[in-house]
Image: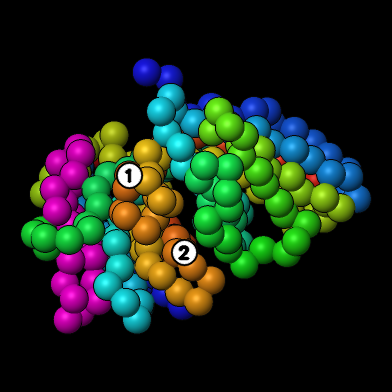
């Protein structure tokens, strides 16, 4: 059974540009969540989607957005990139019937997308 | 809002010694608690979780953790460290706050295992 797949694995962008990251959840999983990991801030929750609807959102500015498609695949977008957006972006999926976190469902992480902003 | 603290950003133990990684949380409502492990250049892998029921939770690779409500702790232990346990460990809490259901990670503890 394939795990959570994230693309691209590595990318470099320039300040001011925008970036889109993709996540394919484990087959059958309907909940997808996104996290940012940096040395300074650690792991931080960005948002969670279930059935194409954003269910939960962390404390990130509006430059960070996401969406989920009918096949449960998800994308996150960061606009007007800043140097501080350089991070590992992790996607996770779970079965979830109404949001993985609210039921304590196990979430499975992908290997992440390394974003460097120069 | 909930928060998680992990005492010790770096812990070193000898192979075969007891592993103890500390985690304390704050939450105004009963939380779900998790331990994740991250190996270099990889995503996170769930070690164990506490939702309800038995407070002593057993996970993969011989790890276990005990939920102590009175101490707001969820420390991770393993009786005998193995070289392959060297990794970064994250404690996390999931609870509802004013923004909805949030999932907060601790800062992480890097475990080194010495031969």
Is A116 rendered above or below residue B3?
Answer: above
Q: Quadrant of residue B37?
A: top left
Q: Position of residue A58 (x, y in %)?
A: 58, 63
Q: CA distance from mark 1 to mark 2?
A: 15 Å
Magenta highlight range: B57-78
Element marked by disc 1: loop
Q: Which residue is mark 1?
A: A106
Q: Which residue is mark 2?
A: B102
Query: Are the numbered discs 1 and 2 placed on the same chain, yes or no?
Result: no
Q: Position of residue B93 (x, y in %)?
A: 36, 63
Residue A35 makes an appearance in the image: no
Q: Position of residue A10 (x, y in %)?
A: 69, 31
Residue shown at the point (43%, 20%) measured from the top left = A2
Q: Quadrant of residue B81?
A: top left
Q: Position of residue A101 (x, y in %)?
A: 39, 55
Q: The C terminus of chain B lies in which quarter of the figure? A: top left
């Amino acid at each position: 059974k394939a795990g959570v797949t994230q693309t691209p694995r590595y990318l470099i962008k320039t300040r001011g540009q925008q970036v889109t990251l993709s996540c394919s959840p484990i087959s059958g999983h309907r909940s997808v969540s996104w996290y940012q990991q940096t040395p300074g801030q650690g792991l931080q929750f960005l948002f969670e989607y279930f059935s194409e609807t954003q269910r939960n959102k962390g404390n990130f500015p509006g430059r960070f957005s996401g969406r989920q498609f009918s096949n449960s695949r998800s994308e996150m977008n960061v606009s007007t990139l800043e140097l501080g957006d350089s991070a590992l972006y992790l996607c996770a999926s779970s079965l979830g019937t109404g949001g993985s976190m609210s039921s304590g469902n196990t979430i499975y992480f992908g290997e992440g997308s390394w974003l460097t902003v120069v | 809002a909930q928060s998680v603290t992990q005492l010790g950003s770096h812990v070193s133990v000898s192979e075969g010694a007891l592993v103890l990684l500390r985690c304390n949380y704050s939450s105004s409502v009963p939380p779900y608690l998790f331990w994740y492990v991250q190996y270099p250049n990889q995503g996170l892998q769930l070690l164990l979780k506490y939702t309800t029921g038995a407070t002593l939770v057993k996970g993969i690779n011989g790890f276990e953790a005990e939920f102590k409500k009175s101490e707001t702790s969820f420390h991770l232990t393993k009786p005998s460290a193995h070289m392959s346990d060297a990794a970064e460990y994250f404690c996390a809490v999931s609870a509802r706050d004013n923004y909805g259901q949030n999932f907060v990670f601790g800062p992480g503890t890097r475990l080194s295992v010495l031969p």
